[in-house]
Amino acid sequence: MSNEQALNYNNYLKVDELLSLQQPLSDGPEHDELLFIVIHQTYELWFKELIHEFAASQVALEAGDTHRALSILGRIRAILKICVAQIDILETMTPLQFNSFRSRLGESSGFQSAQFREVEAILGRRDVRAAAHLLPQDKERVERWMAARSLWDSVMHYVVKRGYRIPDSVMNRDVTKHYEPNPDVQEVLIELHRKDPEAGLVFERLVDIDEGLQEWRYRHVKMVERTIGRKAGTGGSAGADYLRQTLFNPTFPDLWEIRNRF
C-alpha cells in the first residue's frame, strides 16, 4: 500500500467529505445557519446509531443475554442524554437569528426525518400516517420496522426466556398493531422485579430510556416555542402545537403502571 493509500484519520472518517456537507443557503451566509445545519446533521448521525443499537438490543433480549442487553440499553440512554444536551446549543440562537435564514428552509422540516420515524417504529409506533409524507424509499424503511417486532415485543421474549409466562395473546399478537397495556403482563413484571433483580435492572434501563425520550420531546417543544412561538413549523407542520401532543405518552406503559405497586 502506497503512502497515498495508507489508512489515516482523514480517509477512515471521510473527514473531507463530511466537512463538505454543510452548505448554508442564506445570503452572506447568515452566521447561525451553519450551527442549525451542524446540529441537525448530528441528530441524523445519532438517529443512525440509535437504530443500530436498538436492533442489537432486540437480538440480545430475544437471546436472553442480560449482560449484553444492559450494556446496549445503557448506551442508548447515554445517546439520548446527548440528544437532549444538543438543544442547549441550539437555544443559544435567538428568534431573530433563526428568522434571518428560516425562509430559506422552504418545505424542509424535522417531520421529514425518516430515521426518527424508524426509531419511533422500533419503539412501537404503528401509525402508517407517520410515514405518509416521506419519500418512497424512506417510507418503505419505516413500514418495514412497523411490520416487525417492536422493542417491547422483544422484551416479552426476554421475559419468557427468564422462565416467566406471558399470555399467548401477547406473544402471538399482530405486531403491526399498536401494543395496548396489559394487566396480566403487569402482574408478571411485578413478580419479576421481586424475584429476579438481574432482569429487574433491564427494566430499569427501559424506564431510563422512556424517561429520556420524554425529556427530549419536552425540551424540543420548549425550544420550538422559544424560537417561533405558536407559528406553524417549516414545511407546513403544526410546530409546537403538534409537538405538545406527543408529551407524556410513555413508550412502555406497563412499566409505568406498576410503579405504585412496590
Image: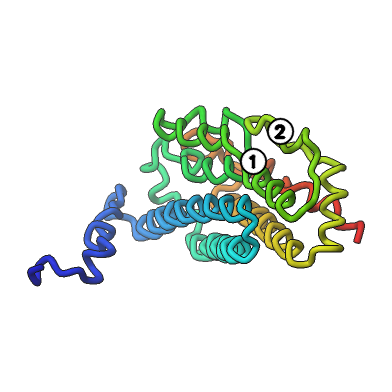
Q: Is 79 left, or right, of 208 in this rendering?
A: left
The kind of residue tagged 1 is Gly
For this rendering, which residue is in front, 66 or 28?
66
Identify the residue shown where x is 22% and y is 61%. Answer: 16
Q: Are marks 2 and 1 in contact (CB under 8 Å)?
A: no
Element carrying mark 1: loop
Q: Which residue is mark 2?
A: 172
What is the quadrant of the C terminus in the image? bottom right
Identify the residue shown where x is 68% and y is 54%. Answer: 210
The label nearer to you, 2 versus 1, is 2
What is the quadrant of the N terminus in the image? bottom left
The kind of residue tagged 2 is Asn
Element carrying mark 2: loop
Residue density around tag 1, few if under 14, some if 14–19, many if 20 or more, within 10 Å = many
> Residue 83 location in percent, x, y?
54, 60
> Residue 182 location in percent, x, y?
82, 40
Residue 124 marker: 1
Residue density around tag 2, few if under 14, some if 14–19, many if 20 or more, within 10 Å = few
Regarding residue 20, the answer to whether it shows in the image is yes
Residue 40 marker: none
Residue 74, placed above or below residue 166: below
Q: Is 41 left, or right, of 172 in this rendering?
A: left
